Amino acid sequence: MTSNLGYGPAEKGILIVLSGPSGVGKGTVCKELRRCAPDIVYSVSATTRPPRAGEVDGVNYFFKTREQFQQLIDQDQMLEWAEYVGNYYGTPRKFVEDTLNSGKDIILEIEVQGALKVKQKFPEGVFIFLLPPSLNELESRIVGRGTESEDSIRSRLSVALDEIALIEHYDYAIINDQVELACSRIRSILTAEHCRKARMVSKIKHWMAEVKK
Amino acid sequence: MTSNLGYGPAEKGILIVLSGPSGVGKGTVCKELRRCAPDIVYSVSATTRPPRAGEVDGVNYFFKTREQFQQLIDQDQMLEWAEYVGNYYGTPRKFVEDTLNSGKDIILEIEVQGALKVKQKFPEGVFIFLLPPSLNELESRIVGRGTESEDSIRSRLSVALDEIALIEHYDYAIINDQVELACSRIRSILTAEHCRKARMVSKIKHWMAEVKK
């Protein structure tokens, strides 16, 4: 009767997928999370684009040749991937699984379509949708980048609304009204998910089995 | 295009049911929660036992005659009830529903069997099971009360194990290793539940409808 019910290292980590429309501030929230929740691991993407000065393989990206990348796709080793300006970008399954098996939580910041592909292969992940406080706010953020025409802004807003409609496939929705508040909500979700009965039951069974000895 | 997506007063509150075996420290956790989370309302029980000196109707208990209590049972106005040492004790549905409709969260601290009865009538509640760090610890807490014989302690421990097996009906499990930590986990669960997509979707629909105007 000495076994303890701790949140111990035997527990698997949780995959958090943070997504939301372009311009909602996913990157800013992740940057703040890295600061305030250094215990969470950040998923590293693979790409076929050549490394830029200072970029380190396995830290900024996993740099792959086109053949290597294609092989990973063929072997179902990519949770999702897409081609962008002639290069492949994707999320390697192995890095995510190794992190989870080591008991650490991992966060994947990704656009809405990519997140839905990840969900097909990893339904046990926790899918969080980041929302703008208002559409006005989203418009200001897109305009604020100062790189787009009025037509382009209108088209991006329309895409954003279509993306927001996909929220039905997600587990949680968080409003990015304040970055610190959004981060605190993500951390609460992670804590709550670790307390889910389904994640605790195996631990309890083990404990009760010991008790009966 | 001016509407805001806030966690506004239009949202209904959440019923949290905190339960767990006798001796696990439900009362201590609730006392600490009252201190650190004064925004949560605490459910007030009804009873047929006469008020003691200083007890206020509607604060400590809703004091009822046996006839009034029986009428509430007959009208399905009790989420659960039980008889104890010749008196009725129960959870009035109205107080819980009025609080939720006002947008406030309410917590109900209750033993395991009572919680399961509440679940039948209120499946949308969030059911949290409080666990002892170990069975040794639970034994110490029961012995610590100093009021029971060895046989009685053994019998209470056996009841506690049977109660722990009922965890399968709960949503979350929290280990009461440190009271402050247990409270912080409960608050995280509450925050996460408010961020659940199902609770946000009605808000988003309204918002998107306004956007289309």
Image (tube, coloured by chain):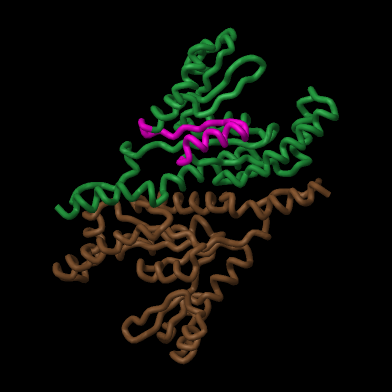
Chain colours: A brown, B green
Residue A8 placement: quadrant: bottom right
A84 relative to A41, above or below: below
Q: Residue at x 46, y 86 (%)?
A: A69
Out of A77 and B92, give the one closest to the viewer. Answer: B92
Q: Residue furthest front?
A: B74
Q: Residue at x 42, y 50 (%)?
A: B196
- Give residue B124's position: percent from left, percent from top: 45, 41
In this picture, residue B52 sits left or right of residue A55? right
Q: Residues in magenta? A: B101-124
Q: Is residue B111 magenta?
A: yes
In this picture, residue B26 sits left or right of residue A193? right
Out of A148 and A155, give the one closest to the viewer. Answer: A155
- Give residue A159's position: percent from left, percent from top: 24, 66
Q: Is residue A127 magenta?
A: no
Please tell me how many numbered marks the rendered image carries: 0
Out of A119 and A131, give the one closest to the viewer. Answer: A119
Q: Residue at x 68, y 42 (%)?
A: B164
Q: Residue furthest bottom?
A: A67
A48 relative to A118, above or below: below
- Give residue A206's position: percent from left, percent from top: 73, 54
Out of A57 and A107, give the one closest to the viewer. Answer: A107
